Image (cartoon, rainbow, N blue to C red):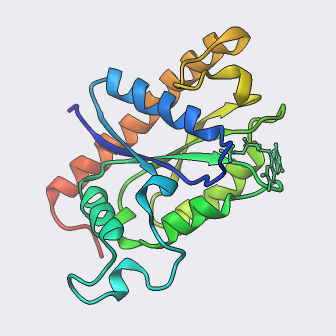
Amino acid sequence: MSGLVIPVIYGSYRRDRMGIRAARFAVSRLAAMGHEPVLVDAKATGVPILDRMYKEYADGEAPQALEELAKLYDRADAFAIVAGEYNQSLQPGLKNLLDHFLEHYFWRPSGIVCYSQGAFGGVRAMTAWRPVLAEMGMPAISSNVPVPRIQNALSEDGEPQGDAAERLEKGFSKFAADLVWWAEAAKAQRAKGKPPY
Ligand SMILES: Cc1cc2nc3c(=O)[nH]c(=O)nc-3n(C[C@H](O)[C@H](O)[C@H](O)COP(=O)(O)O)c2cc1C
C-alpha cells in the first residue's frame, strides 16, 4: 500500500514564526516517500476562532475553509501534527484549528513533530498533545520528531542543516515508517467495513 493522504497540521499565527520550517520538512520528506502530504496552515486557511464546530452548521453553511478541511480530512489516512511549545504546553492556534472537527479524525493515527527555539525541542508540548489527540480519536504513535533550536536546525524552506541534520533525517525516517505502519493498518481495517461507531 502506498500514497497515503497525510495532512500536516500547523497552527502558529506569529509573524516571525519558525514552525513552518518543520511543517515544510515533514511535507517534503513524506512526499519523497511517495505519500500525499497536504500542508494545513491555520494562518493561511483562514479558519475562524471556534464558534460552531463544522458539524454544528447546517449543510452548506459552514465557512468555506472548514468545508475544504472536511473534504481533506475525509480522505486522510494519518495526521502529522507540527507542535510548537508555548509556556510548556499547546499553541492556541493549533488547538483552535483542530477543535473545529472531531469525528473526521476517528480511526486514524497521528504523529507529532515538535519544536522550539530552545534546547528541549518542544517535548513538553508533545506530551501535552498526547491525551488531546487520543480524545480526538487520532491517537499519537510512540515515535516523534523533536526539533530543538529550530532556527538553526532547519532552513526557511525546511531543509535540515548544521549539526542537527543527520539526527533529523534519521529521526524523521523512523517516525514516518512508524506512522505509515499504523496508517496502513487502520486503512486496511476501514476497508473491511464501517468502524464500530
Ligand atoms: C507565548 C510563547 C510562549 C513560549 N513558551 C515556550 C516554552 O514554554 N518552551 C519553549 O521551549 N519555548 C517557548 N517559546 C518559544 C518558542 O519555542 C518559539 O518562539 C517557537 O518559535 C514558537 O513557534 P512558532 O515560531 O512556530 O510560533 C514560547 C514562545 C511564545 C511566543
Residue 106 seen in this snapshot: no
Q: Residue at x 35, y 60 (%)?
A: 107
For residue 180, what is the image quadrant?
top left
Q: Looking at the picture, how far across and down is residue 94, in whole percent?
A: 58, 59
Q: Is residue 182 above or below residue 51?
A: above
Q: Residue at x 71, y 57 (%)?
A: 128
Please give the count of numbered marks on the rendered protein. 0
For residue 192, what is the image quadrant?
bottom left
Q: Looking at the picture, how far across and down is residue 64, in whole percent?
A: 30, 70
Front position in the image: 93 or 124: 93
Residue 142 seen in this snapshot: yes
Q: Quadrant of the C terminus?
A: bottom left
Q: Looking at the picture, how far across and down is residue 27, in whole percent?
A: 42, 33
Q: Looking at the picture, how far across and down is residue 47, in whole percent?
A: 45, 67
Answer left or right for 36 relative to 95: left
Front position in the image: 164 or 133: 164
Q: Is residue 7 above or below residue 47?
A: above
Answer left or right for 26 relative to 16: left
Q: Quadrant of the N terminus?
A: top left
Front position in the image: 193 or 5: 5
Q: Residue furthest front?
A: 15
Q: Residue at x 28, y 56 (%)?
A: 72
